[in-house]
Amino acid sequence: MPRILLLPGDGIGPEVTAQARRVLEAAARGADLALDFEEDLIGGASIDAHGTPLTDAAVARAKACHAVLLGAVGGPKWDAMPVATRPEKGLLRIRKELGLFANLRPAVVFPALVAASTLRPEVVAGIDLLVVRELTGGIYFGEPRGQALVNGRREARNTMVYDEEEIARIARVAFEAARKRRRAVTHVHKANVLEVSQLWVQVVQEVAADYPDVSLQHQLVDSMAMLLLREPANYDVIVTGNLFGDILSDEAAMITGSLGMLPSASLGAGGVGLYEPVHGSAPDIAGKNQANPLAAILSVAMLLEHSLDAPEAAEAIREAVAGALADGHRTRDLILPGQDLAAIGCVEMGDRVLARLERS
Ligand code: NAD
């Protein structure tokens, strides 16, 4: 029986994770899939209980599971702690321990939320793209790095380095994801000036030979930044390295206009996927039943798709979310100035999605 580890964390983490679990259980029931749930602490909650943001026991549990669903970590209570022992370290550790090299960030605009984007409705309508970002290599980790005094001047350097296997494995994640979508991969690079990007172009092209049913185009990162604003609905899967992916995934996300709607998945060589909303622990609204649980709920849709091979159950959740929004249900963060809609709470939004799911 697939085992799911819940790491609700801090702030609104437990609230949104509770709703996501209800929806996951219902969707799994609908797909005749029995799940086994475990729960552990991460972040500030783990610091308070165990003096560390993630225990070895929690790491071992995560490694023994099929997938981990995480809420959020951090909050003012732990802000004054030394960097090495802060809640965020728990997040960094779990990602490292699970060897998560691929970060998947979908950007979808639900028809009912088209007006939340800062772009014009006709540009935003139909956006459904997935940014696949390499997470463990590139300029954020390359050596040599550091600052030094050279000839009396301060100088600093970082190194962008990738080997062919690191590129091939992330490219395969992108092509596999594209096969479950609209079968179009856009590789984003800067091969006109960077040798690293020239290797990416070669290796991605080689991997593409194994996926003749998926189209591939290469796009310069500067053009891509513009095209995402001009014609975002034209893209399906975007694959790129750590630095470009960091920037483009946030750009794509903000086109959709709502932080409370953004899920993510991180996949690795070990086979355990980590699923979490993109937003933080929102201490300003924690414990008030005001959080939007949809990012966490959409994260369990990704969990069903990527860790449990249940794409139909995943789609049922996405349709239930779209349906609840189309019915006019909104948490406070989704109501735009001038809109005549009454806000519902985190639990009530969970109820609305469940009702839609059970109807389907
Ligand atoms: P945040 O994402 O927690 O909140 C930013 C704003 O968006 C707040 O006004 C918040 O109320 C709102 N918001 C966020 N998620 C929401 C939701 N689901 N529903 C409704 N409103 C929502 O970012 P922040 O305020 O910069 O950080 C707060 C804490 O979260 C900090 O301790 C930070 O370190 C931590 N953080 C954690 C993660 C993570 O766990 N992955 C990510 C970012 C920040």
Image (tube, helix red, strand yellow):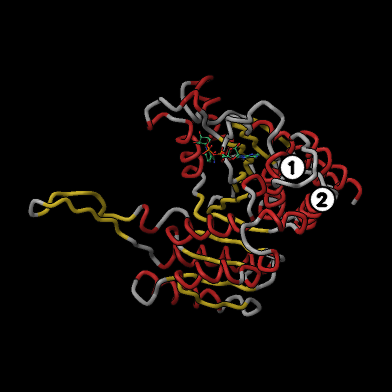
Q: Name the residue under label 2.
A: 320
Q: Name the residue under label 1.
A: 1
**Alpha-carbon neighbours of circle 1 within 10 Å: few (<14), some, or many (≥20)?**
few
Q: Is residue 135 left or right of residue 45?
A: left
Residue placed at 72% from the left, 44% from the top?
Answer: 335
Amino acid under disc 1: Met
Res. 132 image quadrant: bottom right
Res. 341 image quadrant: top right
Residue placed at 37% from the left, 53% from the top?
Answer: 140
Residue placed at 66% from the left, 78% from the top?
Answer: 213
Q: In this view, does 299 lie to the left or right of 148?
A: right
Give the CA distance from mark 1 to mark 2: 25 Å
Image quadrant of ligand 1? top right
Q: What element carries label 1?
A: loop
**Alpha-carbon neighbours of circle 2 within 10 Å: few (<14), some, or many (≥20)?**
many
Residue 25, above or below 264: above
Beta carbon of the mark 1 residue lies under 8 A of ligand 1: no
Residue 53, above or below 209: above
The image shows residue 96 at horizontal and vertical percentages of: 46, 44
Residue 8, above or below 204: above
Q: Is mark 2 on a helix, strand or loop?
A: helix
Q: In this view, does 147 lie to the left or right of 208?
A: left
The image shows residue 229 at horizontal and vertical percentages of: 57, 66
Of circles 1 and 2, the one toward us is 2
The image shows residue 305 at horizontal and vertical percentages of: 70, 55
Q: Which of 44 and 79 is in front in this view?
A: 79
Amino acid under disc 2: Ala
